Image (cartoon, rainbow, N blue to C red):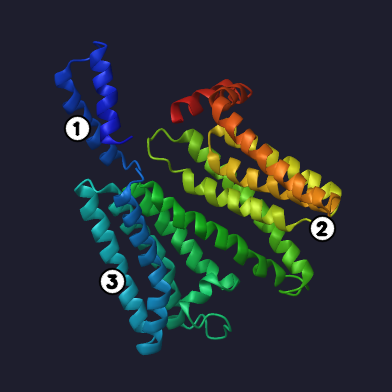
């Protein structure tokens, strides 16, 4: 809520005699300071610029490492990545002490993102990647799947947990969630090495999809656990929900074989995602569930009315139906969400009411 909206609401309360007019400005100041200390995210122009700058700095790590290796070699990359990491931690501490929670969280996140880079350089210096075909540059970490990346991922999770314990900013969960996703991908080659399955065979790709699906479910369960157990105003579960839904939904969408029964199961699963989103008041479930429902309905319309004007009519009708559904959902969202939450255990209802 902007400062103008807060002032208007408090002035209305003063008009009704609920507080004195002289209390309006002190209350606004108190709410602003409280929001800064809690690290609550307010998406205004400043916040967008801060996050954009942070994401660009994190993305620059891969380019920096490539240029550093080509110019100076791995030992220098190791030294520079450690200096950069310590600088990011120092900036996060300094900004946090001055109430700049968003900027401090971005620098702390940058520190976590630098951990795999430092470990990557250390592994090369120690000769662990001597026989690797796809690990000449750090950017390969984001492109190729290999079980040896797991040392970098485990180190990132460990440092990420320590940083989260120290700084307690919600954005720190983002690199941890990404690392968990990467780890799920890199476990597959380790499993394949124990069998006779080729790394790029159809069976291997199917195994990757299934493991990704399971990893998505586990990440969502972790997000739910964090969501229900957290008593902080900081939303630590947000990024876990985002990557959990992305991983689960992406793997589920890639498993279809075109059969009608599979499409109906996929449709039902996406409808369940929408209901879960309503129960937990997490819109990321509704977004991906809505996309899935639209994809299935569009595909069914195409197959039933292929090469005819009826397809255009059905697609138009489908579009208008989704618009009407969105309008009705917006009107009755609170009532629907309340009724759905009544289906949950009482203890979980109380936690969700407190959390949201």
Circle on res. 257: 2
Q: Position of residue 240 (x, y in %)?
A: 51, 48
CA distance for labels 1 and 2: 58 Å
Q: Earlier in the sequence, mark 2 or mark 3?
A: 3
Looking at the image, the residue that sits furthest to the left is 22
Which circle's residue, 3 or 1, is located before the other in the chain?
1
Q: Position of residue 268 (x, y in %)?
A: 75, 40
CA separation in Å, label 2 and label 3: 50 Å
Give the image location of residue 162, x and y in percent: 38, 53
166 displayed left or right of 253: left
- Tell me the quarter of the picture where residue 23 sits: top left
Q: Which mark is residue 29?
A: 1
The mark that comes first in sequence, 1 or 2, is: 1
Cβ–Cβ under 8 Å for marks 2 and 3: no
Q: Nearer the viewer, mark 2 or mark 3?
A: 2
Residue 297 point in image, percent of width and height: 75, 46
- Does residue 201 appear in this view? yes
| Secondary element type, mark 3 | helix
Q: Residue furthest front?
A: 309
Give the quarter of the figure containing the C terminus. top left
The residue carrying mark 3 is 83
Question: Which residue is painted at 52% across and 72% down in the image?
Answer: 141
Q: Is residue 34 visible?
A: no
């Amino acid at each position: 809520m902007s400062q103008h909206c807060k002032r208007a609401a408090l002035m209305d309360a003063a008009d009704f005699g609920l507080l004195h007019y002289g209390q309006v400005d002190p209350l606004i100041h108190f709410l602003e300071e409280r929001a800064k200390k809690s690290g609550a995210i307010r998406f205004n122009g400043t916040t967008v610029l801060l996050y954009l700058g942070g994401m660009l700095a994190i993305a620059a790590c891969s380019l920096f490492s490539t240029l550093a290796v080509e110019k100076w070699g791995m030992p220098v990359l190791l030294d520079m990545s450690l200096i950069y990491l310590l600088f990011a931690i120092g900036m996060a501490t300094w900004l946090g002490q001055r109430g700049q929670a968003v900027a401090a969280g971005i620098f702390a996140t940058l520190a976590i993102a630098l951990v795999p880079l430092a470990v990557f350089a250390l592994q090369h210096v120690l000769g662990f990647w001597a026989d690797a075909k796809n690990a000449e540059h750090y950017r390969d970490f984001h492109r190729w799947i290999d079980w040896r990346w797991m040392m970098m991922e485990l180190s990132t999770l460990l440092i990420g947990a320590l940083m989260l314990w120290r700084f307690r900013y919600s954005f720190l969960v983002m690199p941890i969630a990404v690392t968990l996703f990467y780890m799920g991908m890199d476990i597959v080659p380790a499993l394949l090495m124990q069998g006779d399955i080729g790394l790029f065979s159809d069976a291997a790709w199917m195994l990757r999809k299934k493991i990704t699906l399971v990893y998505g479910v586990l990440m969502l369960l972790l997000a739910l656990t964090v969501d229900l157990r957290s008593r902080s105003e900081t939303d630590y579960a947000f990024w876990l929900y985002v990557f959990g839904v992305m991983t689960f939904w992406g793997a589920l969408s890639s498993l279809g074989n075109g059969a009608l029964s599979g499409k109906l199961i996929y449709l039902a699963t996406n409808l369940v995602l929408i209901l879960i989103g309503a129960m937990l008041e997490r819109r990321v479930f509704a977004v991906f569930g809505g996309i899935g429902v639209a994809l299935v309905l569009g595909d069914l319309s195409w197959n039933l009315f292929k090469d005819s004007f009826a397809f255009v009519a059905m697609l138009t009708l489908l579009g208008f139906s989704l618009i009407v559904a969105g309008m009705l959902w917006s009107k009755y969202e609170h009532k629907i969400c309340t009724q759905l939450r009544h289906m949950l255990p009482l203890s979980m209802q109380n936690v969700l009411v407190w959390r949201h």
